């Protein structure tokens, strides 16, 4: 049996690698940056430095060297010349820049949003028990819809009536229309016992509804297993919701349990998988494929190829 994980792993690679590259802490002005003469003698503000660094990292890492056919250096000048009254305005400018590239897997994460991604990749979280995903409202525009991809059974959101496919409109007073799923999760999570005021809209509903949900510690069951029958044939099912640092160990344990029942068919269920930790996905593939089998590859903007095998 050969299971091709390349599509899911490729999505995870694009999300994690680029999101990690565009999450900034302390930054200095890039030495090569050519500033407009009018402001060359003036020191850059922290927000201008942030915008300049975002442009520089994108310029270095983005594979499409045409940058969606736009004047890429003019984009840099515009970002550096702009006056930012707050850090959030710089974040908005960076998101607009990345949206102009037309690549849904190239995203900007604030430090808080990156922390949320890291928490998901390494284990349990405190929140309401939902997995979120975002999709653009219109290609090339920064506006997004944050949707509930999965609801953890028995969690606070499940008890409050939140369903997969519901749109998160507002979280604790924060409009989510310009946020990625990772950024929205920052507002959904919080201290155990604290209350979240969540505005959601279900499919077919004209008006959203407001829910008050108490946060709690939630164990994200990234891997589950079950036994079933397909047309009378015994089958073992291992479902993977996301890839984290512990996924390979969890899948190994699930396979041991499922295969002990000697099923005639083994099903690896990746439906609804939200991606996650790239190495976790590669390690899972190594459990399933014969030695020496290709898993996936990553090509950078200089056409260097890194191949992952079992």
Image: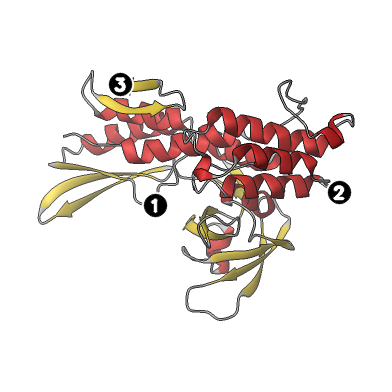
Label 1 sits on a secondary structure element that is: loop
Q: Residue at x 10, y 55 (%)?
A: 232
Badge 3: residue crowd in 10 Å (few <14, some 14–19, many ≥20): some
Closer to us: mark 1 or mark 3?
3
Q: Image height check: is 310 above or below 2?
A: above
Task: Indicate which disc residue 309 carries.
Answer: 3
Q: CA distance from mark 1 to mark 3?
A: 25 Å
Q: Mark 1 packing: few (<14 Cα in 10 Å), some, or many (20+)?
A: few
Q: Quadrant of the C terminus?
A: top left
Q: Position of residue 248 (x, y in %)?
A: 39, 30
Q: Residue furthest bottom?
A: 206
- The answer to whether 174 appears left or right of 180 in the picture is right
Tell me if residue 80 can be seen.
yes
- Left or right, 1 with respect to 196, comes to left
Please name the residue that numbered disc 2 is placed on. 85
The answer to whether marks 2 and 1 mark residues whose Cβ atoms lie closer than 8 Å is no
Q: Residue at x 51, y 59 (%)?
A: 148
SS at circle 3: strand
> With respect to residue 26, does 239 lie above or below?
below
Q: Which mark is residue 272?
A: 1
**Residue 150 percent across, percent down from the top left:** 47, 56
- Front one among 255 and 244: 244
User: What's the CA distance linking mark 2 and mark 1?
Assistant: 40 Å
Ranked by sequence position, the earlier of labels 3 and 2 is 2
Coloration mode: secondary structure
Q: Name the image quarter holding residue 144.
A: bottom right
Q: Label 2 near label 3: C-beta < 8 Å?
A: no
Q: Which residue sits furthest front?
A: 37
As measured in the structure, the alpha-carbon distance from the residue carrying label 3 to the one carrying label 2 is 49 Å
Secondary element under disc 2, as helix, strand or loop, is: loop
- Outermost residue on the top side: it is 292
Return the x and y of residue 9 as percentages of the image width and height: 38, 36
């Amino acid at each position: 049996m050969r299971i091709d994980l390349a599509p899911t792993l490729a999505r995870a690679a694009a999300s994690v690698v680029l999101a990690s590259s565009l999450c900034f802490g302390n930054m200095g002005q890039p030495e090569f940056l050519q500033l407009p003469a009018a402001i060359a003698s003036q020191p850059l503000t922290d927000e201008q430095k942030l915008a300049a660094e975002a442009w520089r990292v994108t310029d270095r890492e983005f594979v499409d060297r045409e940058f969606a056919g736009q004047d890429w250096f003019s984009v840099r000048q515009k970002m550096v010349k702009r006056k930012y009254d707050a850090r959030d305005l710089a974040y908005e400018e960076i998101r607009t820049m990345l949206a102009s590239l037309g690549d849904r897997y190239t995203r900007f994460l604030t430090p808080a949003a990156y922390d949320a991604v890291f928490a998901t990749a390494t284990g349990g979280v405190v929140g309401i028990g939902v997995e979120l995903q975002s999709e653009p409202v219109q290609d090339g525009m920064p506006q997004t819809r944050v949707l509930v991809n999965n609801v953890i059974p028995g969690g606070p959101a499940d008890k409050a009536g939140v369903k997969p496919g519901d749109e998160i409109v507002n979280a604790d007073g924060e409009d989510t229309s310009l946020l990625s799923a990772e950024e929205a999760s920052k507002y959904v999570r919080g201290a155990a016992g604290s209350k979240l005021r969540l505005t959601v809209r279900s499919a077919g509903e004209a008006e959203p509804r407001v829910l008050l949900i108490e946060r709690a510690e939630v164990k994200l069951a990234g891997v589950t297993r079950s036994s079933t029958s397909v047309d009378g044939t015994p089958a073992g099912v291992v479902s993977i919701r996301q890839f984290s640092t512990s996924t390979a160990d969890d899948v190994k344990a699930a396979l041991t349990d499922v295969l002990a029942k000697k099923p005639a068919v083994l099903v690896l269920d990746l439906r609804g998988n939200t991606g996650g930790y790239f190495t976790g996905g590669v390690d899972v593939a190594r459990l399933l494929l014969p030695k020496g089998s290709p898993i996936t590859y990553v090509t950078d903007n200089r056409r260097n190829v890194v191949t992952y095998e079992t």
